[in-house]
Image (cartoon, helix red, strand yellow):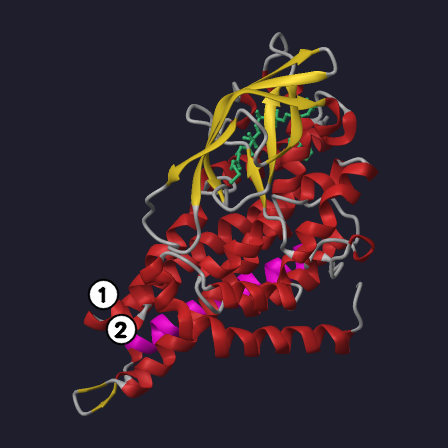
Amino acid sequence: MALDKGTLEQLTTAVRRFTEEQLIPNERLVEENDQIPEAILTAMRDLGLFGLSIPEEYGGLGLDLAEECAVIFELCRASPAYRSAIGTNVNIGSQGIIIDGTEAQKRAYLPRLASGDLIGAFALTEPDSGSDAASISTSAKRDGDDYILNGTKRYITNAPEAGLFTVFARTSPDVPGADGISGFLIEAGTPGLSVGALDRKMGQRGAHSADVILENCRVGRDTLIGGQEGIGFKTAMRILDRSRIHIGAVCVGVAERLIDQSTRYALERKQFGQPIADFQLIQAMLADSRTEAYAARCMVETTARRRDNGERVAADASCCKLFCTEMVGRVADRAVQIHGGAGYISDYGVERMYRDVRLFRLYEGTSQIQQVIIARDMIRQMSAALS
Ligand code: COS
């Protein structure tokens, strides 16, 4: 553990208070304006939320993953759009540098990512390459000491706000699949890099995504992550291993919020002369949701701690992503059901959360991709044991 128990408790208590006093009351505003108010972003920076995972020597809070998840459980009691604002800096937009970056790359970018002055984005997906991430076609052609990148990246979270893009591109066109891929750190404003129009999404208003277009974008060799060609796919997979546990924690936070809100509503709402909480069919839905959210919390805490202890947890990270994202979908569905007609009306915010959580089963690897990763691992292990 990077923090002693008391300090971690102080941090999670501060985040819980911030969530209750500032984030939840502004959820509707964020939804209506498709924008998080600047004052809230400033408060998030002041709390150190952009730098949760970034080592202290580079200006972050240096939390380990279990501690980060404890903070995320609290933060995600509010609309997921808030988490998305810090999410790329904490995870997919900074971890490439932390995991495989050179010392110069760490010094150049981590302090500003930690403070939230710089927003990071992770550009892997393309119009024709989603689940099959090793099939990306964005090219990075060597030209003297430079690389020239061409291609389009799709659904890139925080692209409109980002000052730094972790871009994956093919440096060896003759090497098919994963081995020909390299990661680059490209700053916004680099000639040849542009960001498309905002994606119009089903939910998570206030969190933005867009295409990132690379047209003869010339970058120096110092932008190559780790200064090494051909390791980009593995960098991307290692980033995703970590962030899939983080997404599990996000789902736990949202589920716990929905369960509290549903329980409160069930006690207030009267039908047939009594609170609907007295009816066993309502109780069954509440109990199922609590049980599943508790299982998800235990799973995330255990997997995060095991990763912090240096264990290889790639398949279990996928178990977390699969179970937690599916779990919160069921919890949100029951929350709508318990609220009845009110669950379908925007005033209560439940329909908003129902739409918001749908994304979790898609990004950072669909549920089906998590199943593939888990089953492949099982088969590999059993085959090795049998041979
Ligand atoms: N950590 C380190 N290395 C890994 C790894 C991991 N978690 N997963 C795979 N690798 C390595 C493999 O060991 C292999 O290396 P070797 O050739 O040296 O053995 C290489 O990477 C290729 O792996 P694999 O053969 O498993 O690749 P596949 O093309 O079969 O695809 C999946 C793997 C499907 C798991 C991958 O493409 C994936 O995760 N897809 C979803 C992408 C995603 O999440 N997109 C969301 C975008 S971010 S919002």
Residue under label 2, please give it: 339
User: Residue drawn at (53%, 22%), measured in percent from left and top?
Assistant: 136
| Placement of 19 over or under 154, stated as above or below | below
The image quadrant of residue 61 is bottom right
Residue under label 1, please give it: 344
User: Residue drawn at (49%, 36%), measured in percent from left and top?
Assistant: 369
Which residue is nearer to you in this view: 309 or 26?
26
Q: Hey, what amino acid is under mark 2?
A: His
Mark 1 element type: helix
- Left or right of 257? Residue 165 is right
- Left or right of 177? Residue 327 is left
| Placement of 230 over or under 68, stated as above or below | above
Secondary structure, magenta segment, majority class: helix
Q: Is residue 180 visible?
A: no
Magenta-highlighted residues: 281-303
- Left or right of 325? Residue 202 is left
Which residue is nearer to you in this view: 386 or 27?
27
The residue sitting at the bottom extreme is 273
- Number of dots carrying numbers: 2
**In x, y percent, where is residue 307?**
73, 51
